[in-house]
Amino acid sequence: FAGELIEYGLEQCDQNDKHIQTLQSNTKIITRSCSNMKKIINDVLDIAKINSNEFSIEYDQFTIAEMMSELIDDYQQISKLKNINLSYMIKKNVPESMFTDRVRINQILANLLSNAIKYSSLKYSVDSDTKGDVLISVDTVFTDDMYIKFDIKDNGPGIPEKQLDGIFNHFWQARKNADQGAGVGLEIVIAHG
């Protein structure tokens, strides 16, 4: 919230001043970083709630296109800094809205999207001008019921097949290095069943 107030104050200043532009850019980065830190803390708290059987799902109706647009906006700046093309596609057969826990769906997609951006790299790219491409596609799957399916495709190294069994475990990571998160991303999916 404080970052947003600072951003508002800077918007009232002379927009042609290069120092103000730099301050605005840095303030936006700080605001986003605080938001990301809050997301990580909430992820860890959710894991604690899951473990104590106190996790609940808050149902709400929302439009899929709006959620996807906001998600892409949240990660557009970091993807540009890494020369990664970020986009989404909603197939025509997908309903306009869905009734589920938007916060949890967004949380899962944000964790997956963050990893896709983090691990996309030049050695996996076909275009020498960009480090990679990340595409979120939304489709429907029909079995006895209809499901909304979110696919995130990137050109990162992926997870070795022999490690796939571990992706839903507590704090699991395929690669251990200092530049990683806490590994809480996919465990939250289990709570959704």
Image: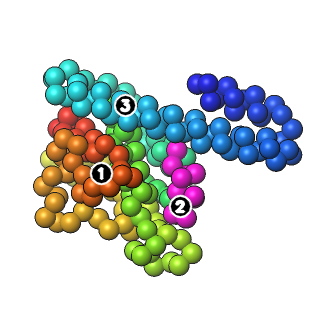
Do we see residue 151 in this rendering?
yes
Q: Quadrant of the N terminus?
A: top right
Give, as a single range, the part of the protein colored magenta: 74-84
Label 1 CA crowd tier, 10 Å (few <14, some 14–19, many 20+): few
Q: Position of residue 34 (x, y in %)?
A: 51, 34
Which comes before the other along the chain, label 1 or label 3? 3
**Does the magenta segment cover residue 79?**
yes
In what element is the residue under mark 2? loop
Q: Residue furthest top?
A: 54
Do we see residue 189 in this rendering?
no
Q: Residue at x 64, y 29 (%)?
A: 4
Query: Which residue type does callout 2 highlight?
Result: Lys
Which comes before the other along the chain, label 3 or label 2? 3
Discs 1, 2 touching: Cβ within 8 Å? no
Q: Position of residue 77 (x, y in %)?
A: 58, 51
In what element is the residue under mark 1? strand
Q: Which mark is residue 41?
A: 3
Q: Which mark is residue 82?
A: 2
Report how far apart the C-alphas of labels 3 and 2 lie in the structure: 25 Å
Label 2 CA crowd tier, 10 Å (few <14, some 14–19, many 20+): some
Report how far apart the C-alphas of labels 1 and 3 lie in the structure: 27 Å
Q: Residue furthest front?
A: 178
Give the labeled residue for mark 1. Answer: 149
Query: Which residue type does callout 1 highlight?
Result: Lys
The mark closer to the camera, 1 or 3, is 3
Q: In the picture shown, does residue 39 fall above or below 95?
A: above
Which of the 4 quarters of the picture holds residue 44? top left
What main secondary structure does the magenta stretch of the protein show?
A: helix
The mark closer to the camera, 1 or 2, is 2
